Image (tube, grey):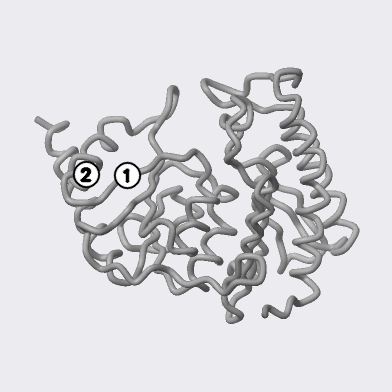
Amino acid sequence: MTIRTPIMNVMTAAARKAARSMRRDFGEVEALQVSRKGPSDFVSAADERVENALFAELSRARPAYGFLMEERGLVEGADKAHRFIIDPLDGTTNFLHGIPHFSISIALEREGQLIAGVVFQPLTDEMFIAERGQGAWLNEKRLRVSARTELSDALIATGVPFRGRPGHELFNAELAALAPEIAGIRRFGSAALDLAWVAAGRFDAFWERNLSPWDVAAGIVILREAGGYVSDIEGGETMLESGSILAATPGLHATIRERLVRARQSAQAATAI
């Protein structure tokens, strides 16, 4: 049974409270007021309500902490060592189309290091949590990544570049490098849940490019505490800065990374011709 620290209690309580309006709005998704932020990138009234609720709850509990949020951006705090990184609705497009696969994502950073993460799927009541050195949990169940080591057994999640995003040719090259060798590929539309599902052993790996820090910060903590390996696709630690991420079981990370890097090199060579 997990023993939750005060900060984890704060983060999970904020997620549960913010999720109340999300559930109501999902039941009335067709009536939402929706505005465009850019091509295929929508922000809804539900998104804003959840972020406002998270900001209010976390600010009340930790008034000096800073924030990095999808809608508000950077909010400086008096305590420069601590910062919450928040995605109020990861999977907005799913939400707006009535697809019940989305999440609230909250991470805590201390002096530039990710130390805690919460990914909450309000419709299934699945609360994925982790603190550095304390393990990863799904509700009261301890999480561990799968033990799979063979590509032929692997089920891998990814994100496909959509309209207005770069990288279509590169993604096609990466897909061609992996698809013939693995058991299956899934694109579910919530990077935070993809990472949490790797931690839970539902997926064996996840890769994507051009993500934002709030898409992956909480999932990185959860994945690492579940025994997984996570890096940028080149093998470095620039996930939050570059938006490139590869998360996998210990037995598959290096193999998948090698194929993705080779695919990028081939795509660049083809472009240069």
- 174, above or below 93, in the image: below
Residue located 25% across and 51% down the image: 183
Q: Closer to the camera, 51 or 102? A: 102
Q: Hey, what amino acid is under mark 1?
A: Ile
Q: Position of residue 260 (x, y in %)?
A: 24, 51
Q: Position of residue 245 (x, y in %)?
A: 41, 53
Q: Hey, what amino acid is under mark 2?
A: Ala
Q: Closer to the camera, 260 or 183? A: 183
Query: Which numbered disc, 1 or 2, marks the residue that appears first in the sequence?
Result: 2
Q: Quick check: 89 left or right of 250?
A: right
Q: Position of residue 23 (x, y in %)?
A: 76, 38
Structural crowding at the residue carrying mark 1, measured as other residues with C-alpha within 10 Å and reported as few (<14), some (14–19) or many (≥20): some
- The Cα–Cα distance between marks 1 and 2, rounded to whole angstroms, is 7 Å
- 131, above or below 123, in the image: below
Q: Which residue is mark 2?
A: 179
Q: Are marks 1 and 2 in contact (CB under 8 Å)?
A: yes
Q: Closer to the camera, 65 or 205? A: 205
Residue located 74% across and 69% down the image: 8
Structural crowding at the residue carrying mark 2, measured as other residues with C-alpha within 10 Å and reported as few (<14), some (14–19) or many (≥20): some
Quadrant including the C terminus: top left
Q: Secondary structure at mark 2?
A: helix
Residue 187: name its quadrant: top left
Residue located 80% across and 36% down the image: 49
Q: Closer to the camera, 181 or 206? A: 181
Q: Quick check: 165 left or right of 76?
A: left
Q: Which mark is residue 108?
A: none
Q: Residue furthest right?
A: 60
Q: Secondary structure at mark 1?
A: strand
Quadrant including the N terminus: bottom right
Q: Which mark is residue 185?
A: 1
- 102, above or below 163, in the image: below
Q: Position of residue 107 (x, y in %)?
A: 65, 60
